[in-house]
Amino acid sequence: MEKTALALSTLLLISGCAQNSNTAASGAPGSGTSTEQSEPHHQMTDQWLGRWVGVEGLFLDISKDDSAGAGPGHYLLEMQYGLDADQSGTFEGQATAEGISFSREDGQHLLRAGDGEATGMKWLLEKEDCLIVATGEGYCRD
């Protein structure tokens, strides 16, 4: 009887461990929420808050999105991203493992960290602290 109880307890324990690992492997939500999973992402991107300067008057201002329900890791990106007047606006962004994902009229973009060389613009080559949208569009700090 004692051996049966021990075997049954061991089987239940193994079964419980297998259930937890299957849940994690399948990507099914566990006890954590998406906010908890994105916390490391927004801790990195929170350091990007403030003004970033591009070339010829282009700029990027990053602020936290304080609207109801936005939560950590949500940002407002105010940008002048081209020389034409219609190439500006404020866009909602969300922290990801790679940077801040956002969408504007010209498509979906990922704002990521880099240096002046990664911007692809000769005017920013010497800069070390930059954010890049795409080659030819970057913003740096001194």
Image: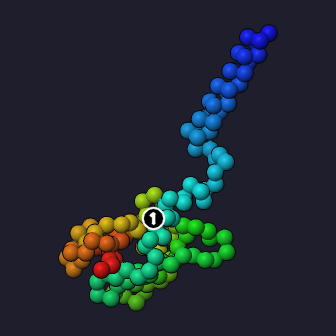
Quickly name the residue at label 1: 44
Q: Is residue 140 above or below residue 10?
A: below
Residue at image x 49%, y 64%?
43
Residue at image x 50%, y 59%?
40
SS at mark 1 in the image: helix
Residue 47 placement (x, y as % from top left):
44, 71
Q: Is residue 88 visible?
A: yes
Residue at image x 58%, y 44%?
27
Quadrant that contains the C terminus: bottom left
Foreground pick, 7 / 119: 7
Quadrant that contains the N terminus: top right
Q: Is residue 74 above or below residue 18?
A: below
Q: Quadrant of residue 53?
A: bottom left
Q: Is residue 26 above or below residue 31?
A: above
Foreground pick, 54 / 39: 39
Residue 60 placement (x, y as % from top left):
41, 80
Residue 135 placement (x, y as % from top left):
29, 69
**Left/right of residue 72 with respect to residue 68 in the rendered view:** left
**Left/right of residue 131 with respect to residue 25 in the rendered view:** left
